[in-house]
Image (spheres, grey):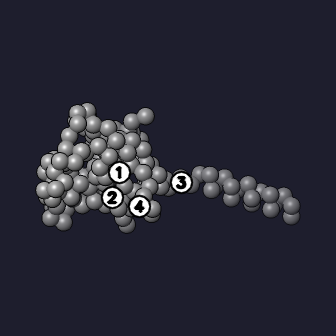
Amino acid sequence: MKWRSLRSLVLAGALAAAIPAHADPMTQVVGRWRDSDGESEIAIARCGAALCGKIVWLKEPRIDRFNPKEELRTRSLMGMQVLSGFAPDANGILTGNGYNPADGKTYRTTLELSAPDALVVRGCVLGGLICDDDTWTRQP
């Protein structure tokens, strides 16, 4: 009886080890990312139950000149939160809002790893009919 229990325990452990663990998409994207044109870096971190991201490096100083609020058009982009409210949707894709300083608009945005060090950032309008992608690279 002892051996049968031990054998069952070993078999259960082996099966558990063989089942691939589902990685948490929120943990996978936490870190520092450089945009595709090399102009800025965004640090993605947990903000409560969701993820957010702020600009932590700029190749050249820039201001939020296209912000719809005139009084904010002279503020620096450095330190600005540009990603907010990201959490996994039903498919496990991180969905939230992304502010684009290039046009001053906020878009429904998804974040999805295409490789361990490549993050596809997709902003969409019209319920996802029109989207634009950018691939960010993980930084040390």
State the separation of the CA atoms marked 4 and 3: 21 Å
Q: Secondary structure at mark 3?
A: loop
* Discs 3, 2 touching: Cβ within 8 Å: no
Q: Residue at x 23, y 36 (%)?
A: 61
Q: Secondary structure at mark 2?
A: strand
* Discs 2, 1 touching: Cβ within 8 Å: yes
Mark 4: give few (<14), some (14-19) or many (20+) Cα within 10 Å. some
**Which amino acid does the dot numbered 4 rest on?**
Ala
State the separation of the CA atoms marked 4 and 1: 10 Å
State the separation of the CA atoms marked 4 and 2: 8 Å
Please give the residue where the numbered disc 2 appears in the rendered image. Answer: 84
Mark 2: give few (<14), some (14-19) or many (20+) Cα within 10 Å. many
Q: Secondary structure at mark 4?
A: strand
Q: Secondary structure at mark 1?
A: strand
- Where is residue 129 drawn, in percent x and y? 15, 61
Please give the residue where the numbered disc 1 appears in the rendered image. Answer: 53
* Discs 4, 1 touching: Cβ within 8 Å: no
**Which amino acid does the dot numbered 1 rest on?**
Gly
| Nearer to me, 8 or 86 | 86
State the separation of the CA atoms marked 3 and 1: 26 Å
| Nearer to me, 47 or 96 | 47
| Nearer to me, 23 or 42 | 42
- Of circles 3 and 2, the one toward us is 2
Q: Residue at x 44, y 55 (%)?
A: 46
Please give the residue where the numbered disc 3 appears in the rendered image. Answer: 21
Q: Which badge, 3 or 1, comes first in the chain's sequence?
A: 3
Looking at the rendering, in which quadrant would you find the N terminus? bottom right
Q: Which badge, 2 or 1, comes first in the chain's sequence?
A: 1
- Where is residue 10 drawn, in percent x and y? 73, 54
**In this orientation, does residue 69 appear?**
yes
* Discs 4, 2 touching: Cβ within 8 Å: yes
